[in-house]
Amino acid sequence: LRAFFRNVGIRWLLRPFSVTDHNRIRFYGNRIDKRFRAFQWRYQQRSASELIRNLFITNPRYNSHCRFFDYPSRLDAYEIGSNIACGCHAAVYELRRTETRDPDVAFVRNTGLTMLQSQPTESFSASVQDRLLAYPLALKIMFNYDFKAPEHSLWTDMGSELVPLIQKQYSLAGRMRKLKMLPRPHPNVIKMYTAFTDRMPILPDSYSLYPEALPSLNFCELAINEPKTLFIVMKRYRMTLREYVLIMKRNYWKARVMYAQLLEAITYLYDHTISHRDLKSDNILLDFDSDEDTPHLVVCDFGCALVTGSWIVDYQDDSVDLGGNLALRAPEVSCACPGPRSFVDFRLADLWASATLGYEIFTRSNPFYSMLKSHSYMEDELPQLPKRVHYAVRLVTKDMLRRDPKQRPDPHVAANVVSFSLFRYGENIRKILDDCGLDELFVYTGLSELKTTVSATISKLKKKVEETFDDLMLLYATETMVSRRLCPGIISSAELQVWNSTLLIFNL
């Protein structure tokens, strides 16, 4: 009896007809029945490139930026430290939570990821390392020069600052005008945790740093409500790019990794029709544990960003904002003249500005701060980058500084060229592609044209190219995983992040 039920199954006695259909589907291989054709998308086999993308975007081991933590949205939940920086529109202070340790640091300690390690908060020395451990957050206090304006105007006027804010977007719905926000975080864009409005604090150094931004005594006597302003809680970074190139020993490999990270950020903003318009070394932040580490680079300060969902700005008069940094404005922006039919295109303005920062990364000097002017320079006047800089990086940087935007490369092209030069197998990317049966054409154009064609011959070529790129990406992914497993120190966290971003956005 036991052998009978083992071979036949109890379901024969309960539902004999349904079991017949079940066994037919079971014994006819993996063929999908006609009734399930509407759900065939669930059974489609994904390519190697898609599997690699999903691995590198969802696994915290290779992408630590996919983690989110909840931070309070009130000022009394934090302890404010010393001043970090101060400008015309905001001041940045050290910050930490009052009730508990920062969850980001606690997560790092529990998982063993390569970041700053948590230490007891009772005793801290005056060193920078201890200050970073004591205050792992940064608070940006926006200056509200019109305290009589309603509170909702703060979100409307300062909304572009919150473009990198991902976690709290649902709570900001309806508070700001229609601005284009980033849909997901990016490793090379500053990490924001929360934003809120609260009363303007009177800190010990506020009268000496920004007295004009503080509420006056006459206003405090007449106002019913306390004056408020906007606060942004962010991750704290070690120093700016300008400070790094001035005090740290030059290393061309680290410089190439930082340059690749900068182009990854520009490409990500370009994909979402966002122009930063204020790129400079003071708005580039770096984070690292020791002087030997390769810095992790992020772009910050989106106060001047163009986030309307369009690249075109109607430049009718001088009151129209064209960005914050006059010296690093692209030629098409600096040469624009206001008028009734004058329009400025910011599509490739950030790409041009990032090329000028490339000079600052590799040579510690930006030629457009001293010897050249963006509105009048000639392309043959550009200084040569050092010969120790990779030949592909030198060529693509020169192309990025073309006066005519139509002659500049696509941001994806520039990012791919620099990123592929970082792979141990990609030192000579042209030879690699030739050995794979391809050429550099596909690096520059991608396969979007092949995907839209209806020719049978081109379709076969497209399938062959996709299979070859799958093998190439498997090679790079294997190199990344094996190197991280066998020799953890050979690939820095910043370099690993560039590899991850390259594998994620590569246009297949």
Image (cartoon, rainbow, N blue to C red):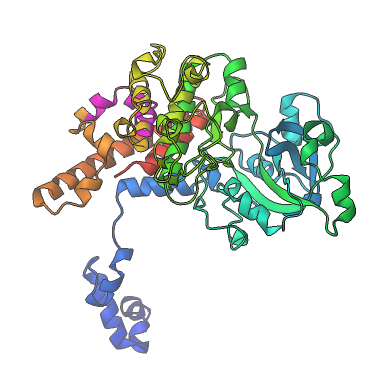
484 lies above or below 317: above
From the viewer's perspective, is 364 left or right of 430? right
Q: Residue 398 is drawn in which quadrant?
A: top left
Q: Residue at x 33, y 30 (%)?
A: 404
Q: Is residue 433 above or below residue 51?
A: above
Q: Which residue reaches farthest top?
A: 387
Of residue 226 and residue 57, the one placed in the foreground of this image is 226
Q: Examine the rendered structure and indicate whether residue 384 appears above or below residue 63.
A: above
Q: Is residue 480 left or right of residue 199?
A: left
The image position of residue 238, as x and y in percent, is 65, 29
Work out whether residue 68 or residue 390 is closer to the camera in this orientation and state it. 390
Residue at (42% x, 33% y) in the render: 351
Which region is colored magenta? 415-433
Residue at point 24% right, 37% down? 442
Q: Is residue 459 left or right of residue 181?
A: left
x and y percentages locating residue 215 in the rendered image: 82, 45
Indicate the quadrant containing the C terminus: top left, top right, bottom left or bottom right: top left
Q: Is residue 487 visible?
A: no
421 is within the stretch colored magenta: yes
Q: Is residue 55 visible?
A: yes
Q: Position of residue 373 (x, y in %)?
A: 46, 21
Helix, strand or loop for the magenta stretch, by majority: helix
Residue 391: percent from left, percent from top = 33, 18
Q: Quadrant of residue 138?
A: top right
Left or right: residue 454 versus residue 417 is: left
Of the 4 image quadrants, the one containing the N terminus is bottom left
- The residue closer to the viewer here, 146 or 479, is 146
The total number of labels drawn is 0
Is 324 situated above or below 150? above
